[in-house]
Amino acid sequence: MSCCFCFSGDKLSPEERKGKYGDAWGQYADNEQTFKVKLCGAPCAEPCCWMGSMICYPCAQYKLRHMALNHVEPGSGWSNYQCCQGMFGGCCCIQPGNMGEDSCPQCCMCVEGTCFPGMAVSASQGVIMQQYSLGLDSDDVRLIRCNNCLQVLACVASCLNICIDFDGDDAVVGFINLVADVTFCCVSGCMTARVYHEMSVREKEAPERFQMQR
């Protein structure tokens, strides 16, 4: 997590808002209101959720998505579920809304949480951000930039490992991948805990609204 602070927390530039991932987050970049806790404060706010999500990530994302969908529309179950909630569009044969979500949403969510872990937690967070018009805080922006840097670094290192042979090359690439994996694990846990905290706080602030709708 500490490596995230090496990156600027300024708002996303127009270049960073391009592409599927950039476009997905760019729509929230100018919103002034943010989550009640910052990304790095989520482990302290919801320690059990943070640790639990890292221990069993697919199960945590399954539960989080169900909670998010029913927070927005209480009692809706899985009726509003789509693969990644359509947040990142489709690719080839993978098209949100045409993946069997209507007939078996729970199975689809299990596959999503297992095969597309980053998109799964981002989609659940997007549901809450859209509901309350939440924006990106400085931690979010640092995360996006840190993630992009790590992904490029891992790609370059893997390519160089194929083209250049030297003592310890496998260890170097393995270390880079380890850093990327640990960073992803910690940050995704923070995102999960923060979304859970946001829903919990808002339901406590206005319990009548959620009780009446349920």
Image (cartoon, helix red, strand yellow):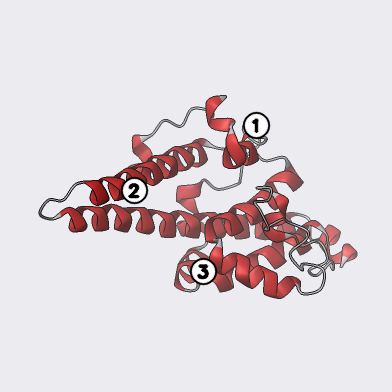
**Label total for image:** 3
Q: Which residue is mark 1?
A: 32
Q: Mark 2 or mark 3: name the one nearer the start of the chain.
A: 3
What SS does tag 3 mark? Answer: helix
Disc 2/disc 3 C-alpha distance (Å): 22 Å
Secondary structure beneath dot 1 equals loop
Q: In what quadrant of the picture does the C terminus appear?
A: bottom right
Horizontal side of 212 relative to 27 (left or right) equals right
Where residue 90 is drawn, which disc sits there? none
Residue nearest the observer in this picture, 163 or 177 = 163
Which residue shows up at 73% across the image and 45% down it? Answer: 130
Nearer mark to the viewer, of 2 and 1: 2
Secondary element under disc 2, as helix, strand or loop, is helix
Residue bearing the label numbered 3: 57
Query: Which quadrant of the structure image shows residue 200?
Result: bottom right
Front residue of 22/208: it is: 22
Q: Position of residue 16 (x, y in %)?
A: 53, 31
Q: Is residue 206 left or right of residue 32?
A: right
Percent position of residue 24, x then y: 64, 41
Task: Please give the label number shown on residue 154.
Answer: 2
In space, the residues marked 1 and 3 are separated at their CA atoms by: 30 Å
Instruction: From this view, report whether residue 136 is shown above or below residue 177.
Output: above
Crowdedness near tag 3: few (<14), some (14–19) or many (≥20) residues, C-alpha within 10 Å: some
Q: Tag 2: Cα neighbours inside 10 Å, few (<14), some, or many (≥20)?
A: many
Cα separation between marks 2 and 1: 33 Å
Which of the 4 image quarters holds residue 66?
bottom right
What residue appears at the point 82 percent right and 68 percent down from the top-left corner?
102
First of labels 2, 1 by sequence position: 1
Q: Which residue sits at x=58%, y=66%?
A: 113
Residue 13 visible in the shown view: no
* Nearest to the observer: residue 80 or residue 157: 157
Identify which amino acid the numbered label 1 is placed on. Answer: Glu
